[in-house]
Amino acid sequence: MTSKDAIRNLMRTQRDALTPLRIRQASARIQRTVMKLPEWAAARRVCMYLALPTEAQTWALLTACWKTGKQVWVPAYRKTARRYDLARLRPDDPVQAGHWAVPEPTRPHWAIPNGMTPNRVMPARVDLVVTPGVAFDRSGGRVGHGLGHYDRLLAGMARHQAFKVGLALECQMVERVPMNARDIRLDAVVTERAVYRWQKHVERKA
């Protein structure tokens, strides 16, 4: 089985060969497809990543959320706790390069669970999670950057059955991602060519 580090190295090589135009074009199609998913239509609270230039972009999804009244929550790094938590993002909130240059709100509006310590969002309040990654497979396997931050966020939301969808360029799809007990399997992966839903093992062309 190919190791995660080997997959990351391969993906970096492929990523470096992509032009900004190629990423924009693929991202536009990916986002249109996501907005056609029934889970997207049903979601009222969406966790969304703010994309790096080399990732599938999410700006159209963010705009669609705000236009249709969906709440947007994004990962932001909490320095005192040395972890990512969720923060509310509204249309006029400024964004800056944060930890590891990942975009995040300049002044995070941290989620405060009712009657609980104001450290973490109530996972049950998130209906859909739009997830980045370095590589994916057709069974919902995901390779991140190796630090486990997103898996820790996903773990809490998975327990409350939030729908987890990965965004990827088709070139980020691999035959198989090695998974361990801490890895969280996604419910679907959307590329510019297809929607992969692992539960039914059905591939639908986008």
Image (cartoon, rainbow, N blue to C red):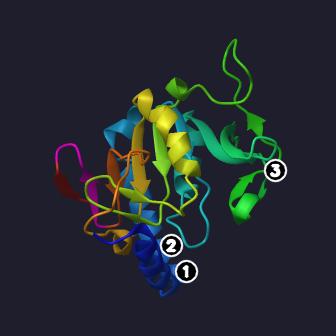
Element type where label 3 sits in the image: loop
Q: Residue drawn at (41%, 66%), measured in percent from left and top? A: 135
Is 122 on the left or on the right of 114, as rendered?
Answer: left
Q: Is residue 113 above or below residue 64?
A: above
Residue density around tag 3, few if under 14, some if 14–19, many if 20 or more, within 10 Å: few
The one nearer the camera, 86 or 96, is 86
- Spatial CA distance of label 1 from label 2 is 6 Å
Element type where label 1 sits in the image: helix
Q: Is residue 205 above or below residue 10?
A: above
Tell us which disc is closer to us: 3 or 1.
3
**Mark 1, residue position:** 20
Q: Residue furthest bottom?
A: 17
Label 1–label 2 contact, CB within 8 A: yes
* Amino acid type indicated by mark 2: Arg
Boundaries of the magenta span: 193-200
Residue density around tag 1, few if under 14, some if 14–19, many if 20 or more, within 10 Å: few
Q: Is residue 173 above or below residue 94?
A: below
* Amino acid type indicated by mark 1: Pro
The mark nearer the N terminus, 3 or 1, is 1
Give the number of the disc on residue 24: 2
Tell us which disc is closer to us: 2 or 3.
3
Q: Quadrant of residue 196?
A: bottom left
Across and down, in percent, residue 58 comes to 54, 57
Label 3–label 1 contact, CB within 8 A: no
Give the number of the disc on residue 106: 3
Is 37 on the left or on the right of 46, as rendered?
Answer: left
The mark nearer the N terminus, 2 or 3, is 2
The one nearer the camera, 94 or 151, is 151
Q: Residue drawn at (22%, 43%), measured in percent from left and top? A: 199
Is 82 on the left or on the right of 153, as rendered?
Answer: right
Across and down, in percent, residue 183 comes to 42, 48
